[in-house]
Image (cartoon, grey):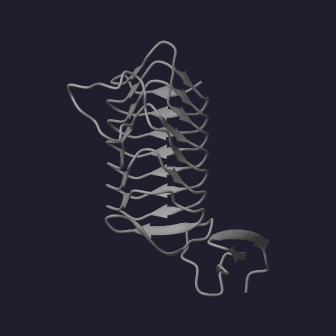
Amino acid sequence: MFFKHESSYVDDGAVVGDGTKIWHFCHVQKGAVIGKDCSLGQNVNIGNNVKIGNGVRIQNNVSVYEGVEIEDNVFCGPSCVFTNVVTPRANFPVHGVYEKTLIKEGASLGANCTVVCGHTVGKSALIAAGAVVTHDVPDYALMAGVPARQIGWVCECGKKLGADLKCKCGREYVLNGGSLDKLGMTNKE
């Protein structure tokens, strides 16, 4: 069972998981699948055929358009933006042909950031508020700016990693070419 505020709509053919909360003025469109224990803040629109995993938090004023997939435990900050057509034209509609965008498990998208369609935001990556993602983002990358560029690495817990790639929470990482791999947990100091 899920909660839906009386001002919101869930279209026939949409699936919403147990424990999910849909707050004021939301619309979940036909064919959308939303996992368990999610939260959709005020004025959230979930487009046709969008897939959203478990434990996802979508803050106020976010539209997730067809072509976007969001994996488990992703945070979408207030007013973050997704697109689904590279070269939109009002007089040349694409009729259901959308670019695919994937937001991987544990990623966080800051307030007012934009993810241009056709890209993947990696596992546990952190996109700063207002950043514009115009290319694929590696797992654990810290991205900021317009266009977004990598300014560091973050732990799965969200803290910025230092040069030793060890987090105060006990997780350790290692660089493997241009990507970061999690080694595991050590004892906290």
Left or right of 10, for residue 131: left
The answer to which of 94 and 186 lies nearer the viewer is 94
Query: Of all residues shown, which one is farthest toward the top?
Result: 12
Query: Of all residues shown, which one is farthest toward the left?
Result: 91
The residue shown at (40%, 59%) is: 110
Q: Quadrant of the N terminus?
A: top right
Percent of width and height locating residue 119: 48, 49
Percent of width and height locating residue 183: 77, 72
The answer to which of 37 and 88 lies nearer the viewer is 88
The answer to which of 168 and 94 lies nearer the viewer is 94
The residue shown at (32%, 30%) is: 25
Percent of width and height locating residue 161: 58, 79
Total numbered circles: 0
Residue 6 vertical placement versus 72 (above, below): above
Q: Quadrant of the C terminus?
A: bottom right
The residue shown at (61%, 45%) is: 72
Percent of width and height locating residue 54: 61, 40
Q: Quadrant of residue 71?
A: top right
Left or right of 15, for residue 4: left
Q: Quadrant of residue 65?
A: top left
Residue 123 vertical placement versus 44 (above, below): below
The residue shown at (57%, 57%) is: 122
